[in-house]
Amino acid sequence: MDLDLVYLYVNANDEDWLNKRKQYSMDGSNQSCRFRDNGEFRYSLRSVEKYAPWIRKIYIVTNSAMPEWFNAGNGKVCVVPHEEIMPTEILPCYNSNVIESYIHKIPGLSEVFLYMNDDNFFGDYVTPDFFVKDGKPIVRMVKAQFAPTTYYKTALCNANQLMEQHFGVKYELMPWHNVDTFSVTEMENCKEEFRVAFDEAKHKRLRTDGDIQKVIFQYYMIYRNTCSLVEYTRHHGLRNVWDYLLKITFPRKYHDYMLVLMPGFANYRRTHLELFRKPKAACINDSEDTTPEHAKKYRELMNKAFPKKSSFEK
């Protein structure tokens, strides 16, 4: 079964992009960490080539210039400008939630595809059956109760509210914040089911509290039984210690993913050990608390994990 990979990408060093965005009023989530470049995309692509070479095609959705190091001549990669998949009347768009709702429009995209942010990467060899079962996408979620206390959780709650209003179901499930698997057909069906809500949301060029998080597509597949659901539970206390020991001792069986903020990753040896015990998927998320020292430590450790330049680099 062919599987493609889609990235959303922004080049924080593209002055034209920055100047165009400044023409619009700043949204509430305009922290510098959302666009700062710590080399994440380069490491992510290195991980793809090293641990998931079977991926057929890589699509990079962007409205900025590609970085100087990027090898545009690599035939496995296709850069997709927003104009190719999004309606002209809503462009330019700087709202990732809106952009993500159009990625299924990429011409030639495989029916089931993977989606990654540039701070996601593979930490060990993975095979397609980690993402697809019996032809269905495998959706990985974390059991959790949540309320609209932050912008991110508000967007999740908006998606959950739509499901509750439309189908009478509500999910206590949050995204695992790593490599996601989607279906082109089910994204299309979901957008048609919630057409009024998506038509209203698509005009929001910048992030707002009315945004619909892409988890709506996962909730929709869960409800329709068109995916295979894998649920993770976050434990505390002694159970959390036990879970950690299992991951470190038997990583191939238990170490499915790693999620950590960059300051925590840089500061604690425990997180370094987790990285080098090879999680199948990982996200090291930049934050407003990241210092230059944290970023330097991050790059040092990632260069150890992925020292070899990929064919996606010049």
Image (cartoon, rainbow, N blue to C red):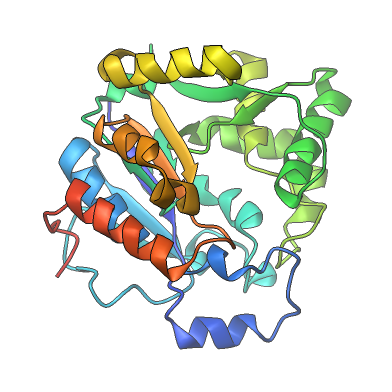
274 left or right of 30 in image? left
Does residue 303 sit above or below 148 in this rendering? Answer: below
Q: Report the residue at 69% width, 71% height from top.
A: 89
**Residue 37 seen in render:** no
* Quarter of the C terminus within the rendering: bottom left
Percent position (x, y) of residue 297? 33, 58
Does residue 202 sit above or below 206 in this rendering? Answer: above
Q: Report the residue at 65% width, 55% height from top.
A: 98
37 left or right of 160 in image? left
Q: Report the residue at 60% width, 19% height from top.
A: 236
Quadrant of the rendered structure where residue 239 is? top right
Does residue 186 sit above or below 73 in this rendering? Answer: above
* Quarter of the N terminus within the rendering: top left
Q: Nearer the viewer, residue 294 or 198?
A: 294
**Residue 69 seen in render:** yes
193 left or right of 250 in image? right
Quadrant of the rendered structure where residue 195 is? top right
Q: Report the residue at 16% width, 42% height from top.
A: 50
Q: Nearer the viewer, residue 246 or 178?
A: 246
Q: Nearer the viewer, residue 278 or 152?
A: 278
40 left or right of 45 in image? right
Percent position (x, y) of residue 35? 51, 68
